[in-house]
């Protein structure tokens, strides 16, 4: 790719990130110094400590829940394997607020299990494990499926037992994926907002929740900005430590797409049955209870939730659904419009500048949505005041979804052989036609996958939207939160019905993404 072409393509994502990410983040730092402290307000070290330790425990338990499933799905071929794989992704694409409502229906004050665990660390950690174990299954399972099983067989032929062969041969090769998944889960738990807002308490708030509380109820901009800076510093340190460890622990070996073997032994069948049962329990229990509680009362079908939605004076369901779908469509277009040229530049480049550009595009993934929304609220009043514009919401959603579009597209563009482009050029095609006739058809599926994830991410986005949405035009997650804040069982059931509607939309979207996923390219 010519240098001039690369600069032109890189200009769009660079300007987008500079205006809507770097400038708001810098404004937070300025705000923390410019505003006087609010009397009686201080940084609660207990909030910081709880944020860190619950993220660490949630990460360890997510690894324990996901690794056995990753092994079974990667190594065995059995009826329903593709469906089981798709089911594991359902929790990850659910909006965090819906996950909180699902656990409220399970272990809330009137939960199905009959025990009230809300306001406890156990409820928060359980919801985080439910939400994040798919990351472990997908990242570790994707690499596990490409490790040649003959390596373990060779170790066994030399006298190593199954456990010793796994520990000495397979695990060192898997370690980069295990650490990568652990790092991602830790960051997600570190910046958790919607789930903690529903299941936590004033004594069990994460930094995200505390930032929201300081801005929305105390108007303590200085305290919120300081917390946002502390969180960003923690996330940056975690990313640097992860990057340094990855460079040191990198292991080069031959990858092959090893076909999973049919289940022939009783032990294999037992493993598959246990994995399927564990997945259905882990995924099906909270979501199934949510759907059951939404449409029943005392074990009998009821339309009380639907009536609550229809008669509600604080939520207008039709406009909320229309607003969510409209914002999601707009955010998807923006994310693809910004992410595709960025992916072309990254895939074509091999030097340090390309790697830095790739890292720059990933930064929004490590920054909390609450911080982004807060920063936009503080910063985007000049040169055009976007704070009162409806455009700011899809822009914020696109910023959060941008890394998914880039990560889905770069590997496919990078895998296209240069000989195809050279052959097209020899036949007289100019660079634009080469891109249109060679690159675009081959990358179309990956772009569609990235767009699908962007659509789902936007549908469930809650943290930034709480700061940016207009009072009269809430999205579905905001409407759910408003109903949860109203007393009465009818409002609770209405919130559950709305959660089921949002869950159905997101699951349908992710199943469509699964159908267009290309075999052999397990991107996520």
Image (cartoon, rainbow, N blue to C red):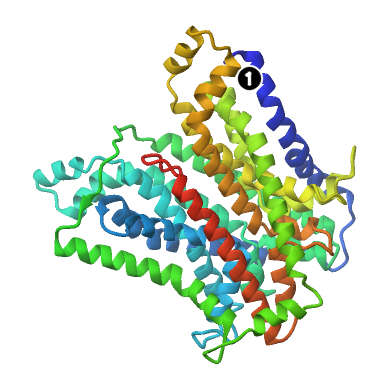
Percent position of residue 4, x then y? 66, 14
Looking at the image, residue 429 sits to the left or right of residue 384; the answer is left
- What is the x, y in percent for residue 371? 72, 52
Residue for point 84% across, 67% down: 218
Point 65% across, 56% down: residue: 459
For label 1, the residue is 6
Q: Quadrant of residue 117?
A: bottom right
Q: 328 or 382: nearer the eye?
A: 328
Query: In the rendered view, would you say 208 is above or below 235?
Result: below
Q: What element does badge 1 sit on?
A: helix
Return the x and y of residue 57 as percentages of the image width and height: 48, 63
Query: In the rendered image of this protein, does residue 419 appear above or below residue 143?
Result: above
Inspect this view and state whether residue 342 appears.
Answer: yes
The residue at the point 60 percent across, 18 percent down is 432
Residue found at the far bottom of this picture: 298
Percent of width and height locating residue 166: 24, 50
């Amino acid at each position: 790719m010519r240098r001039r072409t690369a600069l032109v393509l890189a200009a769009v994502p660079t300007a987008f990130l500079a205006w809507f990410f770097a400038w708001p983040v810098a404004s937070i730092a300025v705000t923390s110094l410019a505003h006087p402290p609010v009397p009686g307000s201080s940084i609660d070290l207990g909030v910081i400590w709880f944020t860190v330790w619950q993220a660490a425990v949630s990460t360890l338990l997510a690894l324990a829940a996901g690794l056995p499933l990753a092994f079974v799905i990667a190594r065995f071929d059995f009826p329903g394997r593709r469906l089981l794989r798709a089911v594991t992704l359902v929790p990850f694409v659910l909006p965090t607020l819906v996950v909180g409502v699902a656990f409220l229906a399970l272990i809330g004050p009137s939960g199905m299990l009959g025990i009230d665990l809300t306001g406890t660390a156990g409820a928060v950690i359980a919801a985080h494990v439910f939400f994040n174990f798919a990351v472990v299954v997908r990242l570790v399972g994707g690499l596990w499926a490409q490790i040649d099983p003959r390596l373990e067989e060779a170790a066994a032929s030399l006298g190593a037992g199954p456990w010793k062969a796994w520990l000495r041969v397979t695990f060192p090769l898997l370690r980069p994926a295990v650490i990568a998944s652990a790092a991602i889960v830790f960051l997600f738990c570190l910046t958790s907002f919607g789930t903690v807002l529903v299941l936590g308490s004033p004594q069990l708030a994460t930094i995200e929740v505390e930032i929201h509380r300081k801005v929305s109820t105390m108007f303590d901009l200085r305290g919120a900005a300081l917390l946002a800076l502390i969180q960003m510093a923690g996330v940056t340190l975690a990313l640097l430590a992860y990057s340094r460890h990855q460079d040191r622990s990198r292991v080069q070996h031959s990858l092959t797409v090893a076909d999973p073997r049919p289940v022939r032994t009783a032990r294999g069948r037992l493993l598959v049955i246990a994995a399927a049962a564990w997945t259905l329990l882990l995924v099906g229990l909270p979501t199934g209870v949510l759907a059951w509680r939404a449409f029943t009362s005392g074990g009998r079908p009821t339309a009380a939730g639907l009536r609550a939605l229809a008669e509600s004076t604080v939520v207008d369901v039709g406009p909320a659904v229309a607003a969510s779908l409209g914002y999601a469509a707009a955010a998807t277009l923006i994310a693809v419009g910004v992410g595709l040229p960025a992916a072309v530049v990254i895939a074509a480049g091999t030097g340090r500048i390309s790697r830095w550009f790739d890292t720059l595009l990933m930064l929004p993934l490590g920054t909390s949505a609450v911080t982004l929304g807060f920063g936009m609220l503080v910063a985007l009043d000049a040169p055009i005041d976007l704070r009162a514009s409806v455009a700011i919401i899809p822009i914020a959603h696109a910023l959060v979804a941008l890394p998914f579009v880039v990560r889905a597209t770069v590997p496919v563009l990078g895998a296209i052989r240069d000989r195809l482009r050279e052959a097209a050029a020899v036949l007289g095609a100019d660079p634009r036609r080469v891109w249109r006739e060679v690159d675009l058809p081959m990358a179309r599926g990956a772009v569609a996958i990235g767009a699908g994830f962007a659509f789902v991410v936007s549908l469930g986005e809650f943290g930034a939207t709480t700061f940016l949405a207009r009072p009269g035009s809430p999205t579905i997650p905001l409407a759910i939160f408003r109903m949860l804040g109203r007393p009465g069982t009818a409002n609770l059931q209405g919130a559950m019905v709305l959660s089921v509607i949002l869950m159905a939309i997101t699951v349908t979207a992710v199943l469509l993404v699964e159908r267009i996923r290309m075999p052999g390219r397990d991107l996520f």
